[in-house]
């Protein structure tokens, strides 16, 4: 239509189209930084990615504070300073609503030899897709927010909202220190924030979506220690109880072949499924066969859309991730590892409590280990402990989000939940009491955490338009109220 509102949006969208190559090039510069937070040796790169974010914000006239969030104790007892968190803001107009967007510039590990078709740290465009570690999780979306602000400046349009920004570099390992920072700054940085918006998850189909729930997560380390050094299996095999045998028994006791978690009591807390909730799954677009193809699996544990979405969104799941200390190189070394650490995580849903889950898991593992009658020692520790998060889809930012999706994509968004975890989402809501929403721009097949992670040029550029339109729609809602 030719309303003044749509004229503003058309001007913004034109600028984004005209500058898309510049935006993609900048994403390439960001992806080139190996900001893998899981590897402490790469925290310098994490800091570099935060510095690049800060430079961009400052180039647009924003003020940046690098907030220190304390130290992390390493397994060897040493304490190291955590990468800081960016708290940024632009000049404030008290008559306008304030949006604070949150994102992260750290990434999951990636090596070409893991099976990537291109170098993970060289953004490579193939058939409209931009491949690179962090392209979608979460450098692309963070840049898209900044480009949306830049678009208002570039088109000389007045910013319709005030902007605050939080960017961290430790999300992939559980957002160390961030919850405490939010508590400390609740009465200062957050006091004038109206809405917190996160864009760190994916759609479930080719249709745009708004997300109103995420699962929580607890990460477990199960350590079994035996002999004082690795031993020859030809000499000691058969005469000692091997730590790896104990660990396999422990890990094997956690879930069955239907995906059911076998830790006693754990499933009891799960919120019951209501008829009303059941109906919500019917209209979601989700192509089971395409999903199978994308993931390269022969079948899922559930044979219908509703079953798969419920397993992803509203039921807990347990995944075993690895065994530290086990022989994992190619070849056939005949060693008995002296100490092994099994790693698994449990995704948590409403109404589960990470602290209760931790107690249940520890009790279960201790009981299984007791049955092993092992002379070895068992140690169970946890990290992360993130709660699930749920929003009210009638809140103002969801209304603005719907209008913005309509303006950019010409359709209504799907209302979805997310199986992954954004550790800080629940803290934002509980500590600040501010309305928190998730506005994803990443595609359902972007492969977060996988080989060949990507964001499509379409999602990156239309996503930038979505954010620009979101600012506009949010301000319009305030004017209309
Ligand atoms: C959804 C987000 N992009 C993400 O990948 N989050 C991580 C956070 C996490 C949870 N446990 C440890 N890190 C995830 O869901 O794996
Ligand atoms: Zn992420
Ligand atoms: Zn991630």
Image (tube, rainbow, N blue to C red):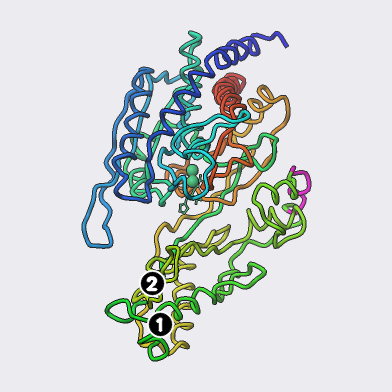
Looking at the figure, which quarter contains the N terminus? top right
Secondary structure under the numbered disc 1 in the rendered image: loop
Task: Give, as a single range, the part of the protein colored magenta.
Answer: 278-285
Q: Residue at x 29, y 48 (%)?
A: 41
Q: Quadrant of residue 462?
A: top right
Q: Which residue is mark 2?
A: 340
Is 282 left or right of 344, judged from the image as shown?
right
Residue 205: image location, x then y, percent: 69, 40
Q: Nearer the viewer, residue 116 or 9?
A: 116
Residue 307: image location, x then y, percent: 73, 58
Q: Nearer the viewer, residue 395 or 409?
A: 409
Q: Residue at x 56, y 34 (%)?
A: 455
Q: Which of the labelled discs sits on residue 411, or is there none?
A: none
Residue 55: image location, x then y, percent: 33, 24
Q: Residue furthest front?
A: 331
Q: Residue at x 65, y 37 (%)?
A: 209
Q: Quadrant of residue 471?
A: top right
Is 281 left or right of 83, judged from the image as shown?
right
Q: Which residue is mark 1?
A: 242
State the CA–CA distance, disc 2 to disc 1.
Answer: 10 Å
Determine the main secondary structure of the stretch shown in magenta.
Answer: loop
Looking at the figure, which quarter contains the C terminus? top right
Crowd tier of the residue under label 1, counting other residues whose Cα lies within 10 Å: few below 14, some 14–19, many 20 or above: many
The answer to whether 126 is drawn above or below residue 285 in the figure is above
Crowd tier of the residue under label 2, counting other residues whose Cα lies within 10 Å: few below 14, some 14–19, many 20 or above: many
């Amino acid at each position: 239509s030719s309303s003044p509102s749509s004229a503003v949006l058309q001007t913004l969208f034109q600028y984004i189209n005209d500058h898309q190559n510049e935006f993609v090039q900048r994403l390439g510069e960001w992806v080139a930084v190996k900001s893998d937070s899981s590897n402490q040796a790469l925290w310098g790169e994490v800091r570099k990615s935060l510095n690049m974010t800060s430079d961009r914000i400052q180039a647009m006239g924003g003020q940046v504070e690098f907030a220190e969030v304390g130290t992390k104790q390493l397994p060897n007892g040493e304490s190291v300073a955590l990468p800081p968190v960016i708290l940024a803001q632009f000049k404030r107009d008290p008559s306008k609503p304030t949006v604070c967007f949150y994102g992260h510039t750290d990434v999951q590990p990636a090596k070409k030899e893991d099976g990537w078709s291109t170098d993970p740290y060289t953004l490579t465009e193939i058939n409209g897709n931009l491949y690179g570690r962090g392209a979608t999780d979460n450098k692309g979306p963070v840049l898209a927010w900044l480009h949306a602000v830049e678009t208002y400046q570039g088109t000389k349009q007045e910013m319709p909202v005030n902007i605050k920004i939080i960017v961290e570099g430790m999300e992939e390992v559980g957002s160390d220190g961030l919850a405490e920072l939010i508590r400390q700054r609740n009465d200062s940085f957050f006091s004038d924030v109206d809405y917190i918006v996160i864009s760190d998850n994916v759609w479930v189909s080719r249709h745009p979506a708004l997300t109103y729930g995420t699962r929580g997560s607890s990460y477990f380390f199960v350590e079994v220690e035996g002999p004082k050094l690795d031993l020859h299996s030809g000499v000691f095999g058969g005469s000692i109880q091997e730590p790896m045998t104990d660990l396999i028994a422990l890990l094997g006791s956690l879930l069955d072949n239907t995906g059911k978690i076998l830790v006693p009591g754990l499933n009891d807390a799960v919120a019951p499924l209501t008829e009303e909730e059941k109906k919500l799954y019917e209209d979601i677009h989700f192509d089971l066969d395409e999903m199978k193809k994308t993931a390269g699996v022969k079948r899922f544990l559930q044979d219908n859309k509703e079953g798969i979405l419920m397993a992803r969104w509203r039921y807990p799941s347990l995944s075993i991730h690895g065994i530290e200390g086990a022989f994992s190189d190619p070849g056939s070394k005949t060693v008995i590892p002296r100490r092994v650490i099994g790693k698994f995580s449990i995704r948590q849903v409403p109404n589960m409590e990470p602290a209760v889950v931790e107690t249940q898991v520890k009790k279960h593992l201790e009981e299984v280990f007791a049955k092993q009658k092992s002379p070895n020692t068992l140690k169970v520790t946890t990290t992360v402990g993130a709660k699930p998060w749920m929003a009210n889809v009638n809140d103002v930012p969801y209304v603005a989000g719907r209008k913005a999706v309509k303006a950019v994509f010409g359709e209504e968004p799907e209302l979805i939940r997310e199986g992954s975890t954004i550790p800080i989402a629940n803290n934002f809501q509980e500590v600040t009491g501010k309305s928190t929403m998730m506005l994803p721009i990443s595609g359902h097949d972007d492969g977060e955490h996988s080989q060949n992670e990507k964001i499509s040029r379409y999602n990156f550029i239309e996503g930038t338009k979505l954010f620009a339109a979101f600012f506009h729609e949010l301000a319009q809602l305030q004017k209309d109220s």
